[in-house]
């Protein structure tokens, strides 16, 4: 069974930090790019960040560039998203997703991902 388990969400004050983790199993992790998406109430799911299979290439949404950092550990089959300088507009359910590294197209195309995690809630509020 393929599993992606997102964790690390919670309530944080504006300006604070959180680290999300995505633990995976059931597929060849080294062959997959992993992305983080988020979905706020009443809004479409949007791509936040993506890391290529080797970890060398990363992509970020303009809204999080310079504040969020995505990284992966191929020895542990995990991907982290470090979120700094959090803002109320970052409040959403965050999901991790996997697609084959060889698949072309924008990292933010939700339809291009084969596997999804269950999501973890991030709330930024004072």
Image (cartoon, rainbow, N blue to C red):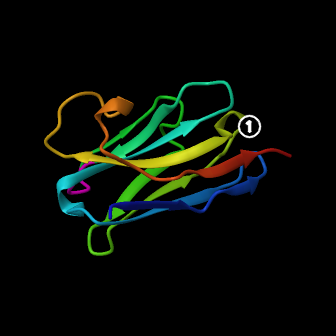
Q: Position of residue 49 (x, y in %)?
A: 42, 42
What residue span does the magenta drawing correspond to? 52-56
Locate residue 58: give its quadrant. top left
Q: Position of residue 25 (x, y in %)?
A: 33, 67
Note whether 95 is above or below 103 in the view shown.
below
Residue occupying the far right of the picture: 126
Position of residue 119 in the picture relative to residue 26 (left or right): right
Residue toward you, 112 or 20: 112
Quick one: quadrant of the N terminus?
bottom left
Residue occupying the far bottom of the picture: 75
Residue occupying the far top of the picture: 43
Note whether 111 is above or below 113 in the view shown.
above
Position of residue 23 in the picture relative to residue 41 (left or right): left
Predominant SS along the magenta part: loop
Residue at 56% over, 46% down: 94
Any magenta on residue 94? no
Residue at 61% over, 44% down: 93
**Residue topped by disc 1:** 88
Residue toward you, 90 or 34: 34
Q: Position of residue 10 (x, y in %)?
A: 70, 57
Note whether 55 is above or below 89 in the view shown.
below
Residue at 68% over, 40% down: 91
Position of residue 5 in the picture relative to residue 103 (left or right): right
Residue toward you, 55 or 15: 55
Regarding mark 1 in the picture, which secondary structure is present there?
A: helix
Locate residue 40: give its quadrant. top right
Q: Residues within 10 Å of mark 1 (few under 14, many from 20)?
A: some
């Amino acid at each position: 069974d393929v599993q992606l388990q997102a964790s690390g969400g919670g309530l944080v004050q504006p300006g604070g930090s959180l680290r999300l983790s995505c633990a995976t199993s059931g597929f060849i992790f080294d062959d997959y790019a992993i992305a983080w998406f988020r979905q706020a109430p009443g809004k479409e799911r949007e791509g936040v960040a993506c890391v290529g299979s080797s970890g060398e290439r990363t992509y970020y949404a303009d809204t999080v560039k310079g504040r969020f950092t995505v990284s992966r550990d191929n020895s542990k089959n995990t991907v982290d998203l470090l979120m700094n300088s959090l803002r109320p507009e970052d409040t959403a359910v965050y999901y991790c997703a996997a697609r084959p590294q060889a698949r072309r197209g924008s990292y933010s195309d939700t339809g291009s991902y084969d596997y999804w995690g269950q999501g973890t809630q991030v709330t930024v509020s004072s």
